[in-house]
Image (cartoon, rainbow, N blue to C red):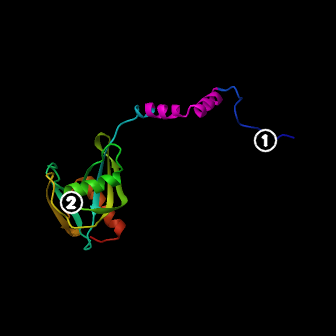
Amino acid sequence: METKADVSHTMPHHSRKHYLALLVRKLPFTVAIAQALFRRTRPRFSVGAVGVVFNDANQVLLVEHVFHPYSPWGLPGGWVERGENPRDAVVRELREELELEVEVGSVVSAELGFAQHLDLAFLCRPLNEVGRLCNELVAYRWTPLDEIPKLHRFHGLAVAQAIAIRGLRV
């Protein structure tokens, strides 16, 4: 006796889905073309990546940005280039801005903000001393946790979350 569990749930062989599945299997590049066309209809995002860098004294690295008029002090970082991994962007930006090599750890904060801009903050460990500053930065300082100035909202959130992850006290 046939039970409901024995009944096949596939469509008849002449269904559109079946023919489409056969076509895709014979011409797999059609999936890549369809995905590319679909992506063109999706919203575009810009992505920024910053590093929350702590030294051995549990001070956080802050930089004074030339182009940030409302909150000049913040975290080092910048734009993620097209096709670039955000972790690699943090390494590149800190190297370009501060001649600082870092080990990039986990994401401590992520936020979709104004104009489809995605911000990512990574916990980082310095591997050398800060070198020469690029033209985008006025100054840098290793800041004790109880002396952190007013920061851009996302930067402040990222620092607070990194402090909590590290189990530090302010």
Q: Nearer the viewer, residue 97 or 57?
A: 97
How far from the left and from the top, in percent, is residue 71? 17, 53
How far apart marks 2 and 1 lie (CA) works out to 67 Å
What is the three-letter code of the residue carrying label 1? Asp
Q: Which residue is mark 2?
A: 99
Residue 150 visible in the picture: no
Point out the image quarter for the N terminus.
Answer: top right
- Please give the name of the residue rendered at 44% of the width and 30% of the height, measured from the top-left corner: 37
20 vs 40, left or right, is right
Checking the image for residue 6, the label placed there is 1
Residue 114 visible in the picture: yes
Instruction: Indicate which label's residue lies in the foreground, 2 or 1.
Output: 2
Helix, strand or loop under label 1? helix
Tell me if label 2 and label 1 are in contact, CB under 8 Å: no
The part of the chain drawn in magenta is 16-37
9 vs 120, left or right, is right
Instruction: Relative to 2, say whether 119 is above or below.
Output: below
What is the three-letter code of the residue carrying label 2? Glu
**Magenta region includes residue 155:** no
Residue found farthest to the right? 1
